[in-house]
Structure formats: structure tokens, C-alpha cells
Image: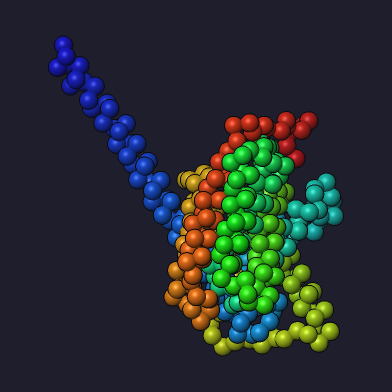
Amino acid sequence: MTDVTSRTTAPSSTPAAHGRTKRGTTTVALVVATVLAGTLSPLQSTVNGALGKTIGDGNTAALVSFGTGLALMVVVVFARTTTRRQALAVPGLIRAGGFGWWNWLAGLCGGAVVLSEGISVGALGVAVFQIALVSGLVISGVICDRLGVTTRTKQPLSPTRLLGTLLAIAATALALSPNFQVPGAVLLTVLPFAAGLLAGWQPAGNAAVAQRTGSMLVSIGFNFLVGFVVLLAGFLVRTAAGTAHFSLPGTWWLYTGGVLGLLSIALMALLVRGLGLLLLGLSSVAGQLLGSLLLDVVTPSVGQTVHVATVAGTVLALAAAGIAMIPSSRASAEPEPAGGAA
């Protein structure tokens, strides 16, 4: 009887074990892909930082970067009948109201990130810039989760999440410490940190616009349009005041910042389906931080010398992100509004 049982149960357990192994292998592959996709962010920072350094004007560099991204999104959106119709309906949706106006301004967050890249990467280096940016994102994420901005489930300010925010601030200070004596270094670090605080809310704004328009592509395109218009307005004001500087460099790769940004958004949208938000967030942050260190090493003309404090700040920032992403056991879900979700 024992022999018969073993012969009949063994085959049925083998497919289950094989399935678990296959899922584990797939998850590892997706994590590796997300880490690699995360390196696109520091690569974009490198390009935009080099563009700002070459032009000598961070505002102009951000305008060029957003302009190339916007041009590509116009082609993508208007190439299809459905998305073209959805995009042309945006003005009517805005006039109709009934939707938080602040969601339409999510592109300002992306504009702040790109502007800070053009201004500060050349002076700070890619690694310090990314540490400050990620630290701002970590703190913003904790605040947004507490308020229920990105989801109906509110995450209380648990001890682990508070620890994550403190570690994020410590990581920025540690990475910046070798440059404390450099004039303006602290002020330059505030730019990516503040941009990270803003960018932490951006996914919620983009998701809301995508729900309203019926298309994430239209949402991303509108995002680029808003950022471009604001950056252009700032440039025109500075031009009238005689403080703007505009020149187009002849090096082709300096125009790829906007394309790299779009590629990063597209890859993350695909990878999140297989990993979920937690693993995606941790893996992409790891790619951002480790990629920025590597870029500072291989592109010293764009970045800065990599100090021990920079490496330690990178490790601390990654730990801060991991700790801050731990869900709280006391999370509470917001009740659905009467009549269903808006």
C-alpha cells in the first residue's frame, strides 16, 4: 500500500514544486530587470547634467530635455485613433471640472526633477544627486501613505517608517559631507531633495489623470506638456530679464534625456505587473543608487569624485527606502464614497 501511495502522489507534487521554482526564477529575473531599468534614472541625470554644464543654463537644459520627451509623446499619442481622441478631449474635461485641478499639474513634479538635474548634477555628481532625490522620495512616500494620497489604505507613521525617514535625511547629509566646504553645495542639494518630495506625489496625480482620460499614455503626454509649458514660461521671463542663455550643443546624446525618462516610465509600468509595488520600488531604488555610483566612476568629467561617504550614503539611502516601504500592521482602508469611486 505504501509503495502504491508513493507512486501515485509523487508525480502530482512534482508539477507544484516545478511551478514554485519557475515562479521564483521569474521573480528573480524581474528583479534584475527592474534594477537595470532603475539605472535609467541616473543615466538621465547624467545626460541632463552634462547638457546643463555644456549649455551653462539649467533651465534651458531642462527645457530641451522635456521638449524631446514631449515631441516623442505627441508622436506616440497621436499615432493611434483612440489615444488621439482621448488627448483632444482633455481641454473639455478640464473645463467640466469635477476633478481635482491639482492632478492636472503632476507634470510640475517631473519638471522640478529635470530642472534640478540641469542645475546641480554637474556640481554634486550623479550619486549625491540621486541620494538626495531618493531621500526626498522616501519621505514623500511616507507622508503620502499616511494621508492616503496614493491609495485608499492609509499607513500610520509607525516606528519603522519614521526610522526610514530619519535614515533618508542622514543618508543625504552623509553623502554631502565631503562637499560641505564647497560654496553653495548645501543649497544645490536642496534642489533634488525638494524635487523628490514633489515627485513622491506625482504617480498619484498621473494615475488620476489616466483614470479621467482613459489612457496612461495621454496622462504621461499631458505630464510632459505641463512641465514643458512651465519651464518655457520660466525661460521666457528670464529671457526678458536678460539672464537666460540658450545654445544647442552638437553632441547627439545630450538630447536623449527625455527619451530615457520615457523609457524608464514604460519599463516600470510593465514590470510592476509581475513584481508588485514593494519589490518594484526596492529594486528600482537599488538600480538608481548603484547605477549612480557606477556612473560617477566611469564619467568623472560629468560627476564628482566618489568618496567613502558617498558609498556609505548610498547604502544608508537604500536601507531607508527598504525600511520605509514596510507596510504598517495598523493600516486602515478608507471607505468607498457613495456611488462608487470617482
Residue at the image position 71 percent from the left and 33 percent from the top: 334
Where 10 falls versus 169 (above or below)? above
Residue 116 can be seen, yes or no:
no
The answer to which image quadrant residue 194 occupies is bottom right
176 vs 246, nearest the viewer = 176
37 vs 182, nearest the viewer = 182
Left of 338 or right of it: where is 39? left
Q: Tell which residue pokes out farthest to the top in this image.
A: 1
Left of 35 or right of it: where is 259? right
327 vs 25, nearest the viewer = 327
Where 237 falls versus 285 (above or below)? below
Residue at the image position 68 percent from the left and 65 percent from the top: 190
Where 30 falls versus 156 (above or below)? below
The answer to which image quadrant residue 55 occupies is bottom right
Residue at the image position 51 percent from the left and 65 percent from the top: 309
Looking at the picture, how far across and down is residue 342, in whole percent? 75, 40
Left of 112 or right of it: where is 37? left
Residue at the image position 79 percent from the left and 74 percent from the top: 233
Looking at the picture, how far across and down is residue 12, in whole percent? 27, 26
Looking at the picture, how far across and down is residue 68, in whole percent? 62, 74
Where 313 falls versus 140 (above or below)? below
Residue 316 can be seen, yes or no:
yes
